[in-house]
Amino acid sequence: MSYSVWIDQDLCTGDGICAEIAPDIFVLLDDGLAYVKDGSGVKKDPGGPQGIVAIPDGSLDAVIEAAEECPGECIFIEPS
């Protein structure tokens, strides 16, 4: 089964833990909020559920860890 991930920027606390754990998926931008990214770029316009990316093979465990460690509980993982 494949999965996708997105961040609710309204809940994001800007700690950047997600970007430390899974830098290939998450990035903290100048606005102080985290966003998801893929090979086509950062999904910031719009963010939220419209800014969803597929989780590449081998990255699921790191994305799950990032979601579990996130103090804002703003990372959402969904089946694709």
Image (spheres, grey):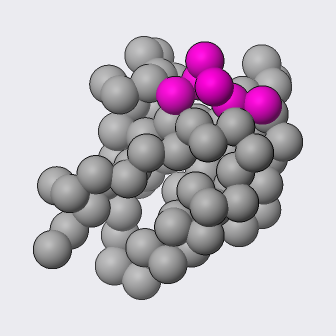
Q: Quadrant of the N terminus?
A: bottom left
Considering the whole magenta stretch, tell me its main secondary structure: loop
Which residue is at the far bottom? 58
Residue 20 in the image: state x and y as whole percent.
Answer: 77, 62
The count of marks equals 0
Q: Is residue 23 visible?
A: no
Q: Nearer the viewer, residue 46 or 61?
A: 61
Q: Is residue 15 visible?
A: yes
Compared across the picture, whether 48 is left or right of 2 comes to right
Q: Residue at x 51, y 67 (%)?
A: 64
Q: Is residue 12 magenta?
A: yes
Q: Residue at x 20, y 57 (%)?
A: 79
Q: Residue at x 16, y 55 (%)?
A: 80
Compared across the picture, whether 58 is left or right of 75 comes to left
Residue 25 in the image: state x and y as whole percent.
Answer: 53, 56
The image quadrant of residue 29 is top right
- Does residue 70 lie above or below 63 as drawn? above
Compared across the picture, whether 77 is left or right of 59 comes to left
Q: Is residue 53 magenta?
A: no
Residue 74 in the image: state x and y as whole percent.
Answer: 57, 37
Residue 62 in the image: state x and y as whole percent.
Answer: 57, 73
Q: Which residues are magenta?
A: 8-13
Q: Residue at x 78, y 31 (%)?
A: 13
- Does residue 16 lie above or below 8 as drawn? below
- Does residue 51 lie above or below 5 as drawn? above
Compared across the picture, whether 53 is left or right of 41 comes to left
